[in-house]
Amino acid sequence: MGRAPCCDKENVKRGPWSPEEDAKLKEYIDKSGTGGNWIALPQKAGLRRCGKSCRLRWLNYLRPNIKHGDFTDDEDRIICSLFASIGSRWSIIAAQLPGRTDNDIKNYWNTKLKKKLIGTGAAEHKKPLQSYTSISVFEPSSRTSAYQYGAVEHSYYTTTPIGSLSGYEIFSSSVPSTLLNTSSCSSINNIQEGHNLHNYQVQESSFPRFRGHEAASCTSSDGDGSSSTNQFSYGKDVEHDLQNYVYNGADDQKPYNENPLDYSSLEEIKQLISTNMCNNFFVDENKTDEKVAHYT
DNA sequence: AAAAATCGCAACCGCTCTCAC
DNA sequence: GGTGAGAGCGGTTGCGATTTT
């Protein structure tokens, strides 16, 4: 026996929203808010729509400050970077791009960005990349850490916890050579063209499934963006000198994501990793390929 | 000019997770 | 602890618009 439907599908309207419906929904939410109950909202607002449909329409289209179309190069880079790091966690990616929705980003990635990268990624490199490993550090927040591990688990990375340092959790992620030359991971190659992997990224991430702050939501996704984990990633090629290959003489030595987070809190760890750990870590290429095969 | 193919995106579906009871 | 309802998420679909043949 399946679960009960969220609404009476026979009596709700489906398909594209009319301007009148949009106006009704917007007017109602402007006046009364969502009340934290989307299922009951359509009836109160006088709409013959499923609550989920109302929610989607509001979040993806009617909500104030939504941006549509014309992704900038910076946005492209952020999307590529995050996709390479966490995979298709669109709500998390959307949280980094104010005004963008997860649906928008997902569509953009699937229809344009992926194709764009196929044309400009590994194929243009003078020699093939072999593999890429990053070391990532997370604040010891058990729930967010667990989700982060989960996120990586579903990406194209193989993830291995390698311990803790100064109270932070550390794990490594590897992308195998096979994927570095595919569309799925060509983004990584592209990122390497623009951002020095020997530097680091610090981002204020917003992870999904943390409830209770609907009104304060600032993400374009369905998530509420209420958590904030500081992630610090340090990339280092382990099979040949990626720095020399990609960035021979490059002057891009700045961190990729210069958001106003507190970098200093992670400085110690950055130092420790850069001096002690990266040089000692090697990819298990066979294991990595096996993992990737499972997800592709 | 018309038909076919492809693209782009809004909307839907179904699953998982959380929370209240 | 078990259960059901609602929210959130990512994948997929449907269809109008655009491009190609």
Image: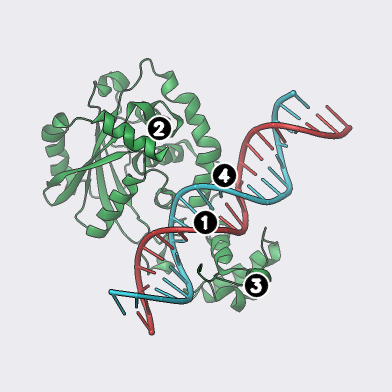
Chain colours: A green, B red, C cyan
Question: Can you name the residue that lies furthest to the front here?
Answer: A1
In three-dimensional space, the C-alpha distance between marks 2 and 4, rounded to whole angstroms, equals 24 Å
Q: Which mark is residue A47?
A: 3
Q: Which mark is residue A82?
A: none
Residue marked by disc 1? A65
Towards the viewer: A292 or A72: A292
Chain under numbered label 4: A
- Could you confirm whether marks 2 and 4 are on the same chain? yes
Q: Earlier in the sequence, mark 2 or mark 3?
A: 3
Name the element at disc 3. loop
- Residue A212 lies in quadrant: bottom left
- Could you confirm whether marks 1 and 3 are on the same chain? yes
Asked if residue A26 shows in the view, the reply is yes
Looking at the image, residue A97 sits to the left or right of residue A59; the answer is: left
Quarter holding the C terminus of chain A?
Answer: top left
Disc 1 crowd rating (10 Å Cα; few below 14, some 14-19, many 20+) is few
The answer to whether the residue labelled 1 contacts the one labelled 3, judged by CB atoms less than 8 Å apart, is: no
The answer to whether the residue labelled 2 contacts the one labelled 1, judged by CB atoms less than 8 Å apart, is: no
Question: What residue appears at the point 51 percent right and 73 percent down from the top-left corner?
Answer: A33
Chain under numbered label 2: A
Question: What residue appears at the point 22 percent right and 58 percent down from the top-left corner?
Answer: A142
Circle 4: residue type: Gly
In three-dimensional space, the C-alpha distance between marks 4 and 1, rounded to whole angstroms, equals 13 Å
Q: Position of residue A190 (x, y in %)?
A: 40, 29
- Residue A126 lies in quadrant: top left
Looking at the image, residue A139 sits to the left or right of residue B19; the answer is: left
Circle 2: residue type: Cys
In three-dimensional space, the C-alpha distance between marks 2 and 3, rounded to whole angstroms, equals 43 Å
Chain under numbered label 3: A
Towards the viewer: B12 or A142: B12
